[in-house]
Structure formats: structure tokens, C-alpha cells
Amino acid sequence: MDRRRDRNIGTPARKSPRALAFASLGVLVLTGCSGLGGGSNTAADAALACPKVSIVRDLAEVTQFRNGGGRDLTDVTSRAALADYSGNCDYTSDGVTVNVNVFLIAERGPAMQGNTANYRYFVAVAKPGEEAPTTKTEFDTSVTFDAGKLRSGSREELAPKIPLPKDANGKDWKIFLGFQLTPEQLAFNRAQMKQ
């Protein structure tokens, strides 16, 4: 098997000050999380770079409200953000697998009942030169809040595979990460970004 490894999967998308402030709340959750890793060791590995990974700005956060309630701070059940990612990629004779660890942080809201919040996020892959994804896979995850704790988080391990001919370079492919939002949640995010 022709296997090559490149630890650089691109750089995280630039985060808004609001997202950074929210992400800083979960800094303890992410303690010990490594960066994107070092560069390649050989010229062959350097030639086969990893696809660009990014968190979609409008879809990087989700705010959940209680059913039938209003939409102010007292109605929030939980908030979550895709705060960061790290990873690498593996080339084989039939393509490239991108190994991505996505760090999700969550905050309990005043209207939350119980101690678990559920979220849905996606991984989408776009061909070189295209913005519309050719494939999209959705995942469900949950975050449990310990008693008396307002914040928690999880690390989601993903491994999307892009089929490529032998020795083809995946560097121009794109991988997008984001929450799967309802139209109302997306509108809420966009309204918050304008403030």
C-alpha cells in the first residue's frame, strides 16, 4: 500500500471576536489539545498536501431555545460552538483520508432541563474550484454537563475520504464543518453577527 502522511490540514477559519469570546469560555475543555502538527518530512510528502479544512462562519455556533418560549436570554437551553480542529491526512493508492478532531464546546442555558444537550453537525466535501459540496454527511452528538457545571465539551473524531487516482494531490479539495441549523437558527446567527 502506498501510504503518505501530511500533518498540515490547513489553518482554522478566522473567528469573529464574539466566537472567540465564546470559545474562550471553554479553554479548560481544550487544555492539552494539540495544534495542527508539524510539516512534512520528505519532498514526496510535501508535494501531497492535505485538503483545506474550514469551519463555516455562519454555521460555527448554535443556540437552542425552549419550545414555545420567547427568544431572549432566559429562553436559551444551550449554546454550542465548533471552536477549533486539528488533524492530519493519509494518502493511499486510492485517495486521501482526512483525520480531523473537531472540538465542540457547549454552555448550559437558564432554560435547560436535565443535563444533556444534543447537537447535529456536518462534514461536507467540495471538489477543486467548486464551493458547492459534492458530499455531505450529518452526525449527531450530545454533551453532558456535570452537576453544578455550566460548560462542557467534546472532541469529535472524523475521517472523510476523498477518492483520488494514485499520486493525485488533494490540496485543492475543501472540507467544510458546521452545525446543521434550522432556518430560524441560521437567521438568529446572522442577526447576532450584525450586532
Image (cartoon, rainbow, N blue to C red):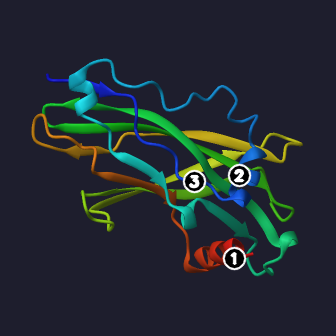
Label disc, if present, on residue 85 of the rendered structure: none
The residue lying at 75 percent from left, 45 percent from top is: 24
The CA span between labels 2 and 3 is 9 Å
The residue lying at 50 percent from left, 36 percent from top is: 86
Q: SS of the residue at dot 1?
A: helix
The residue lying at 51 percent from left, 65 percent from top is: 180
Residue 30 on image: x %, y %: 68, 35
Mark 3–mark 1 CB contact (< 8 Å): no
- Nearer to the camera, 68 or 125: 125
Label 2 belongs to which residue? 20
In this view, the residue farthest toward the front is 43
Q: Residues within 10 Å of mark 3 (few under 14, many from 20)?
A: few
The residue lying at 20 percent from left, 24 percent from top is: 44
Q: SS of the residue at dot 3?
A: loop
* Amino acid type of the residue tagged 3 in the rendering: Arg
Label 1 belongs to which residue? 194
- Nearer to the camera, 106 or 58: 58
Tell me where residue 72 sits by quadrant.
bottom right
* Amino acid type of the residue tagged 2 in the rendering: Leu
* Amino acid type of the residue tagged 1 in the rendering: Lys
Label 3 belongs to which residue? 14
Residue 115 on image: x %, y %: 77, 50
Q: Is residue 127 left or right of residue 70?
A: left
Tell me where residue 136 sits by quadrant.
bottom left
